[in-house]
Amino acid sequence: MKAYAAVDLGASSGRVMVGRVGPDSLELAEAHRFPNRPVRTPEGLRWDILALYAGVLDGLRAADAVTGGRLDSVGIDSWAVDYGLLDADGALLGNPVHYRDARTEGVAEKVWATVPVGELYSSTGLQYAPFNTLYQLTAARDSAQLAYAARLLLVPDLLSYWLTGEQGTELTNASTTQLIDPRTRDWAYDIASRLGVDLGLFAPLRQPGDPAGVLRAEVLEEAGLSGPVPVTVVGSHDTASAVAAVPAVEERFAYICTGTWSLAGLELDAPVLSEASRAANFTNELGLDGTVRYLRNIMGLWLLQECVRAWGEPELGELLRGAARVPALRSVVDAGDAAFLAPGRMPERIADACRGSGQPVPESRAEITRCILDSLALAHRRAVCDAQELAGHGVDVVHIVGGGTRNALLCQLTADACGLPVVAGPTEAAALGNVLVQARAHGLVGDLAGMRGLLARTQPSTRYEPQGDTARWRAAEARLAAR
């Protein structure tokens, strides 16, 4: 068996996992976990990238201890769209801006004045989200940092550069910038030119499985490792890694990657670039082996995380037990509404949304929690149904992976809402996908189907059968549509 370190960075925490892979075995263990705490500075909301890098180094030290000094490779995945700017000497020009920062408010309209929204979608296939890298770059156009920048590296590529000294732009993450053509899987040169985006800022594109260099001598010393230790390019967008770890043994499946966000959709062979797809706010992001992740972004467990934070971190299990006793679908909100994007006052904002739509206002913590879970299940239903219709691709089962697999109530509600069986697991899907791409680069596993077969044989999952019919969910959907 070989041992791989998967650096998996989420919006609220980072972790370094150790995956051991053999001919028909796959084991995953956590070596180190650390917080990811964005910082609000006078300039706005920023990622504390130095603390994250320190966490990575600590994690590599812990991973080396777990493996007894036999670490065969390292791979890095993280959230999408955000980036760091480097000067001509390769030094970082300030902490990366957080995608929830307000600097992109109103920027999309300026972009659309040059490239109409329909043309932008047909060229890049990306849904509208105010924080897409294209809008961030437009917002930063007159900034001193961008004027002095010689290189732009997306977050996982930035960390990989610090580890190895080599620069690259991983394709699955690049596809979230709104600067990639999903048909050619290359830069959208015409769009970038018309919008004044210098593609020369980006390092050359590279694919999952490509070599990304070896750990620098200084990194080996800092982390207490003996070299050489290679770094392997993985699906560096965490959703790309998570979708690669969907343990589907059938072709007709939908997936929901759950965590701070819910990413719900289908895996396709080609993008869907129709006007109907744009109007439904579906995105075409790139996956492994020429696939397209056709999905919709949903606000996800961020809604509950923010409520829990506002309530002083009560015990989650008790909240969920209370929510299970609240009548179903009493009140629902649009879990994809950008009104819930910013942090702060989430319980009040959810109550306000219910009040504004003429529904009963949830007051207790249990009622608010149930409103969130019902709303997420409803959003999952809408995404799965819409994706099938827009892509002409039916499904027989829904796979849920990621942190939401621990939430049995949400999984059951999603099965009920979709009217389809839900298979929940694995929880650490992004880390597993990360590990498997490294293992494949070293010849231990085969194609994407082979990776998924290994997952299905080795990783636990729970199956939820739908209960009742979907009429009440269709009625709740109609309530939201009538707002």
Image (spheres, rainbow, N blue to C red):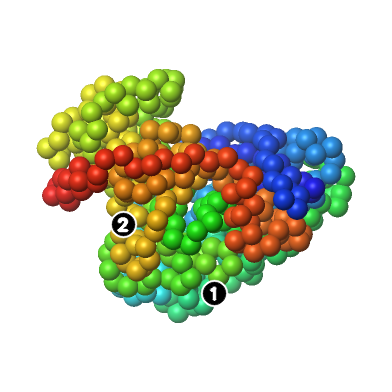
Q: Which mark is residue 77?
A: none
Q: Which residue is mark 2?
A: 385
Specify the amino acid type for callout 1. Asp
> Image check: 402 left or right of 318?
right
Instruction: State whether residue 120 appears in this view.
Output: no
Residue 186 is marked as 1
Residue 333 locus on image (x, y percent):
25, 41
Quadrant assignment, res 220 = top right
Mark 1: secondary structure: strand
User: Does residue 41 appear left or right of residue 50 in this picture?
Assistant: left
Residue sitting farthest toward the bottom: 190
Q: Nearer the viewer, residue 58 or 18?
A: 18
Q: Tell me the residue at 30%/59% (across/down).
A: 386
Give, as a three-letter code, the residue at label 2. Cys
CB within 8 Å, label 2 to label 1: no
- Dot 2, crowdedness within 10 Å: few (<14), some or many (≥20)? some
- Categorize mark 1 by other alpha carbons within 10 Å: few (<14), some (14-19), many (20+): some
Q: How far across and down, in percent of the image, does residue 256 sit?
A: 43, 49
Residue placed most toward the observer, 244 or 457: 457
Q: Position of residue 430 (x, y in %)?
A: 57, 48
Residue drawn at x 48%, y 76% is 183
Between 278 and 169, the one lying in front of the other is: 278
